[in-house]
Image: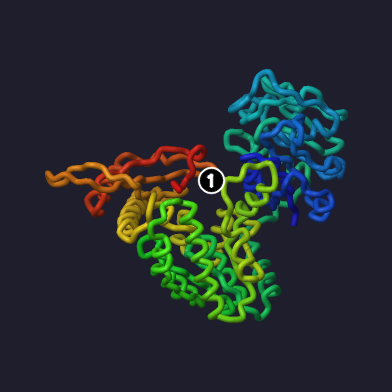
């Protein structure tokens, strides 16, 4: 299968480049900028893309790839900082621009062959740079410009190396998909043979080959990733899979009951239900710090999971629903990207339990996992579920987690999601949920003074959760949700709506 290698220099858009390539049905793989030449040759990509990044090539210790990659004969496309890397390493010059260029710009195409074919004479592009190429490397020629960038794109057709100062991967670049497609198909000669559905049979074969007659244990929350992983592995090895659902007391309304019933009834799954809610809630008593909550929940989960594994006996493999964004972010911790959070799926349990990992979705994005899930016959209600944090409602209750607070939040959250579904916009929202604030305020109910809790509603739109904007849901919907929560949920007299984006905020409140 043809593949494109993306070298990551710390761009906020690196994952987006990978997604765009896959949308064109070509497999994309992301590695750090210093990925060794020997491994590049072993991977044998049809082309290499150098991502953008926050650095300047002339800075001390600037992230730079092995120059020999540019001399390997493999076609290369440099994007933004990647273009500057190419110029810098091959004898050109890069300097700070007198006029920074951020946002939309008009690209004037000077050479409409190869990379910029079918883009048009003038096209809208998205710029984000303070440096620019002031002198081309030998053998290179400009192929496009903007008012502020005389060299907004360049090429060496002999070397099959191209560079663009703008970001073709973002939606604001009107012909970005065509530009990436030109690189894949006209320059690299890729075949469009990447289909998540085709992945199923190959993965089943590999799982059977690796597992043999051994047992596999899988923690299944009921979320998209773990659910699809469990169904795929069960199709491969049947009752050798032991799926485990741990009710930590921090799930949404009747969630554990629904998950267990659905997978036992529809897939005859070998599913172990463990009610450990009392242990989790006891350990969380009096804890208000969000990181302490996460550690307590994580450690308690490991203890409960280990106990189940011992009772099953002779388990050799642990299956996880790790996704490619988790892998990319964990890799980037060693490179120029800023570390925001670690992922519980990348490392952790295997070190403690000494089990061999099976991660069937390690190279897939969330939307690709959903496509696999549909192929496997999992219902849309499961497949289209909004993401849910590992620590559950514990990080949606600001302050101490207590049973009465959990009950308030469950009811409020259920009303919000119910009305979003009724309004027909559940699928348009990336994530929606309620948060219980440690704030009580004065209210009036039935001519009596009240002093009760505040519920914050959060709904965001996003492509991959890396960035997000607040969802502009209709006022009439918010009014109905607020009215229902205040009237139906005892202990709440005020409802607010969160209108912050990510960044600077995060999607979750803790």
Residue 404 lies left or right of residue 336; in this view the side is: left
Q: In this orientation, which residue lies closer to the viewer: 83 or 413? A: 413
| On-image quarter of the N terminus | bottom right
Place residue 166 in its image quadrant. Answer: top right
**Which residue lies at the image location 51% right of the left edge and 58% below the top edge?**
295
In the image, residue 484 sits, relative to residue 377, either above or below, namely above
SS state under label 1: loop
Please say if 79 is above or below 272. above
Crowd band around label 1 with a 10 angstrom C-alpha radius: few (<14), some (14–19), many (20+):
few
Camera-side residue of 195 and 4? 4
Percent across and percent down for residue 250 are: 41, 61
Q: How is the image coloured?
A: rainbow
Q: Is residue 287 above or below residue 137?
A: below
* Res. 18 visible in picture: yes
290 shown above or below 256: above
- Residue 418 visible in the shown view: no
Return the residue found at the far left: 447
Q: Does residue 408 appear left or right of residue 133 in this picture?
A: left
- Compare residues 486 and 277 and report the one nearer the observer: 277
- 156 or 339: nearer the eye? 339
Residue located farthest toward the front when viewing the structure as drawn: 286
Q: How many marks?
A: 1
Counting from the top left corner in percent of width and height, residue 363 is at 65, 57
Relative image position of residue 268 (x, y in whole percent)? 49, 77
Side (left or right) of 159 relative to 458: right
Q: Which residue is mark 1?
A: 463
Residue located at (68% from left, 55% from top) = 194
- In the rendering, at what x and y percent does residue 200 appear? 63, 65
């Amino acid at each position: 299968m043809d593949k494109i290698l993306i070298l990551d220099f710390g761009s906020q858009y690196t994952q987006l480049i990978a997604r765009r390539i896959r949308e064109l049905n070509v497999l994309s793989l992301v590695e750090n900028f210093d990925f060794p030449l020997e491994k590049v040759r072993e991977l044998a990509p049809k082309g290499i893309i150098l991502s953008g990044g926050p650095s300047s090539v002339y800075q001390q210790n600037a992230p730079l790839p092995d120059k020999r990659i540019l001399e390997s004969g493999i076609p290369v496309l440099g994007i933004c900082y990647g273009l500057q890397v190419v110029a810098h390493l091959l004898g050109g010059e890069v300097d700070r621009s007198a006029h920074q260029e951020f946002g939309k710009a008009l690209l004037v195409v000077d050479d409409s062959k190869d990379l910029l074919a079918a883009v048009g004479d003038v096209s809208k592009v998205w710029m984000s740079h303070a440096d620019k190429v002031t002198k081309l490397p030998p053998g290179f020629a400009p192929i496009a410009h903007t008012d502020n960038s005389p060299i907004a794109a360049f090429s060496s057709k002999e070397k099959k190396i191209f560079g663009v100062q703008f970001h073709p991967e973002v939606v604001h670049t009107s012909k970005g998909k065509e530009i990436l497609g030109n690189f894949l198909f006209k320059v690299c000669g890729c075949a469009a043979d990447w289909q998540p559905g085709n992945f199923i049979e190959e993965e089943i074969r590999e799982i059977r080959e690796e597992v043999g007659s051994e047992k596999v244990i899988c923690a299944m929350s009921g979320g998209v990733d773990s659910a699809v992983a469990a169904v795929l592995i069960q199709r491969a090895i049947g009752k050798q899979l032991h799926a485990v659902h741990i009710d930590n007391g921090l799930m949404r309304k009747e969630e554990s009951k629904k998950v267990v019933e659905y997978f036992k009834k529809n897939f005859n799954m070998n599913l172990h239900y463990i009610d450990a809610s009392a242990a989790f809630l006891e350990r969380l008593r009096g804890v208000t710090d969000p990181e302490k909550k996460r550690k307590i929940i994580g450690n308690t989960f490991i203890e409960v999971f280990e106990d189940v594994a011992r009772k099953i006996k002779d388990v050799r493999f642990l299956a996880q629903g790790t996704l490619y964004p988790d892998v990319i972010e964990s890799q980037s911790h060693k490179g120029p990207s800023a570390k925001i959070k670690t992922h519980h799926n990348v490392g952790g349990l295997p070190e403690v339990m000494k089990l061999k990992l099976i991660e069937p979705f390690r190279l897939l994005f969330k939307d690709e996992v959903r496509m696999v899930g549909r192929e496997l016959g999992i219902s849309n209600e499961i497949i289209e579920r909004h993401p849910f944090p590992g620590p559950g409602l514990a990080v949606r209750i600001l302050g101490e987690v207590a049973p009465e607070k959990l009950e308030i939040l469950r009811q409020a959250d259920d009303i919000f999601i119910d009305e979003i579904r009724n309004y027909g916009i559940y699928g348009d929202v990336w994530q929606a949920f309620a948060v219980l604030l440690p704030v009580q305020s004065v209210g009036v109910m039935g001519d009596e003074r009240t002093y009760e809790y505040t519920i914050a509603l959060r709904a965001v739109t996003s492509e991959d959760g890396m960035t997000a904007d607040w969802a502009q849901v209709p006022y009439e919907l918010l009014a109905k949700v607020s009215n229902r929560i205040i009237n139906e949920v005892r202990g709440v007299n005020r409802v607010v709506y969160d209108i912050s984006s990510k960044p600077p905020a995060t999607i979750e409140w803790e």
